[in-house]
Structures are given as structure tokens and as C-alpha cells.
Amino acid sequence: MHDVRTVTAPSMLRLAAASLAGTAIEFYDFFVYGTAAALVLGPLFFPTFSPVAGVLAAFGTFGVGFVARPLGSALFGHIGDRRGRRPVLVLSLLLTGASTVAVGCVPSYGTLGVAAPVLLLVLRFLQGLGLGGEWGGAVLLTAEHAPPGRRALWSSFPQIGPAVGFLLANGVMLVLSAMLSDAQFAQWGWRVPFWAAGVLALSGLWLRSSLAESPRFLEIDDHARVPLTEVLRHHRRLVLLTAGALAVGYAVFYAVTTWSLAYGTERLGVSRTVMLVCIMAAVVVKGSLTPVMALLGDRYGRRPLCLAGCAVSALWSFPMVALLATGEPLLMFLGFTGALIGFITMFSVVAAYLPELYEPRVRCTGAAVGYNLGGVLGGALTPVAATALAQHGGRVPWGVGAYLAAVALLSLGCFAMLPETRPVPAAEPVTGRGEHVTG
């Protein structure tokens, strides 16, 4: 393998900031749908269902976005491995932004009938398709420019993007929720954040227009003809392991940010403003800790942090649902924060970890497909499964805690079977297992 060229810190900062901003915009688009699904989409698009069935149906359309993400990662991964990482960032942002604006324009069931939820499904699928390409392009462009000894740190900037996007999406929803009556919010207020996605997408395209192509991509002499075929033929086990390993991160994040929002407002009777503030405060803590955890990943390795994050997620799953069930804002915030600390202990380093697991000629496809398959396992199923499990039992949804703990143990086992990839400093001996790599 060739050595990655040295990039100055100011250049890395500009690159990381642009990647963060673009990722934040794309995840804003994705998260604003999740919040709307928890709050209003059930009654508007599935009015003939019971309240619980309506929420389940809305979360079903939410899950379609996750199903589309691996397909998007295969499509955009092909472009990224054949044409470069930079075109992926532009095309994925255009697709996600346009489909998000369109969601805000779809008439409700009362106007269009059954065509309304069908349109919602199609647009959510397109959202997921775009986001499936976004992560691979943004992460690889940053990781492949970064110096090996600080790769996890610089790669963590795009990982801060989801937190920023979530805060933006829910901040807009919170302001509208506070300013408008319930009737106004249900009639037109929920659409405003979707329309705002158009302005954000244009600003993101402007930010990304000046980014340089990845030096690692430019050094590849023999590009894979069909990257997905090569990944499935030679790296199938690795894809499945990374998908299983990342499932718990998605499960925890969407249990906190999407399912708990619906559970708190519908089952516990907590106002949506209080629920949004509690969740957003926990996400602020998560976002702030991202670079700190990434530095630990550069110092001690990717795998130890991932194993620790899985262990925390498994142990904290029951306290989290117990604290949520109190309905007390401070206790709910504590429960959410503990869960998201376990989550970010893992996800702060995966942006460096996954690309290091794959050879450069197929890493845009391999890393993105593995990452987004984890989203199907953990993100698409969790709101639906948790909503169904919470219907049985008492006030404390212990079944949800057991579900999260089981996913955490699955991920722990998958991480245990993956090698360490942290680049070895010159003075540090390589282990006899030959696990450390520099690619």
C-alpha cells in the first residue's frame, strides 16, 4: 500500500468542518422524519388505525428509510470506488434534500386517501437511499486525508454531524410546537422543518463544492470493476460482522430519540416539549464527548472502545427504561445520557475503524454497506419492536430493556471477532497476530 500524504492541520480542519456540516444537514433530513413519525404522522396518514397501530404504521414508514440505506450505500459506493469520494457527497445531498422537501408537500390521507401514505413511503425510501451514500463519502474523504495517528479524531467530525442534525431537527420542531396550537401544528406546522431542508441542502452543496478528492483514491491504480460483487465475494464475513457489531448503536440511539419520544408523550402523558428537551440535552452531551472518545480510540485502539460501548449499552438498558418510566425530566435525561454515552463510545471510532478494515479499492462500498446494514438490524426494527413490547407489562417497559440488552450482546460478540486496526506508531512493535494495519 502507498502511504497517505501528509495534510496540514488547517486543511484538515476545513475538510472536517465541511464534512460535519454536510453530514449534519443530511441527518437533519433523516431525523426530522423520525420526530414527525413519533408526533403526528400516524393520525394524519393512517387515521383509520387505532392510536397504537397508527404509531406502528408511522414507524414502519420510518423503517423503510433504513431498508433503503444499504441499497444507497451499494449505489453510491460504486460511484465512490469507481469515480471518487467527492461526487458521492454532492449527489447524495441532492437526493436526500429534494426528497425531504417533497415529504413536506405530501397531502394527508384526508385529501389523497391511500395514495398519501404510499407517497410517504416512496419519499422515505429516497431519503434513505441518499443517506446510505452520504456516510461513506463523508467519512472516507476525511479518514483518507487524515494522518494515521489522528485518524479516529479527524474522522469523528462527520460523526458529530448526526448529533447536530438531530438537535437542528428537534429544535425546529420544539419551537414550532411551543409557538403553535396542537391543531396548527398538525395542520401545517410539522411541514415547515421539511421545507427548510431545501435551504440547508443548498448551503451544504456550497460548502462541499471546494473539497479536494481523497489522496488515497487518487493513488489507486486498479479500481474494482463492480465493487459490490467484489465485496460480497471476498469480504462477506466482514460485512456481516460489522453489520451485527453496529446494530446496538442504532438500536440504542433510536430507542432514545424516536421510540421514547412516542412512549413518553402517548403512554406517560409527558408533554412533547419536555420530552424533546430531555432528549436534546442528552444528545448535546453525546456530541460533546465524540472527539474525546475518538482521541481515546487513537491512543488505545478502536476495538477496546467498541467492546466497552457494547458492555455499557447492555448494562444500562434496564436502568434507562426504568428512569424513562418515572416521567421525571431529570431522571429521564440521566437515563438517556447514560445510554448515549455507551453509544458514542463505539460510534466515535467506527468512522476510522470500518474504512481500515477494507482495502482502499472497495472500501467506500464495503464500509458503507456494513454500516447501513447495521442500521437495518438496529434502527429500522427498534421503534417498531419497542412499541410492540411496551404494550405488554406494567408501567416500566422491561421488555424493551431486554431487547436492547440482547442486541448489545449480539454486537459485543461481533466486535470480539473483528481485528484491531489502529495504525502502529514507528516505535511500537506489531503483535504476533498481525492485526494492526496502516491502510
Image (tube, helix red, strand yellow):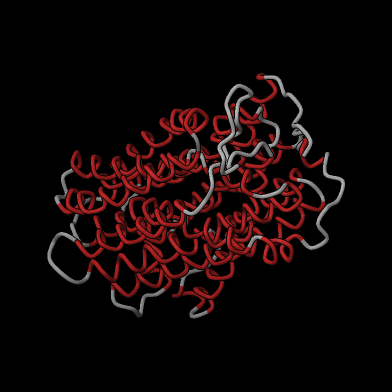
Q: Residue furthest right?
A: 221
Residue 35: tell me if it is visible: no
Q: Nearer the viewer, residue 328 or 378?
A: 378
Left or right of 348 on screen, residue 176: left
Left or right of 84 on screen, residue 58: left
> Where residue 220 sits in the image (x, y, percent)?
83, 44
Q: Nearer the viewer, residue 154 or 108?
A: 154
Q: Residue at x 39, y 37 (%)?
A: 286
The correct choice, above or below, for 70 with respect to 153 in the image is below
Q: Quadrant of residue 388?
A: bottom left
Query: Which image quadrant: the C terminus?
Result: top right
The correct choice, above or below, for 309 with respect to 49 in the image is above
Residue 355: tell me if it is visible: yes
> Where residue 382 sits in the image (x, y, percent)?
38, 63
Q: Residue at x 33, y 78 (%)?
A: 49
Q: Residue at x 29, y 55 (%)?
A: 260
Q: Residue at x 70, y 32 (%)?
A: 145
Left or right of 242 on screen, residue 381: left
> Where residue 316 sits in the image (x, y, percent)?
25, 48
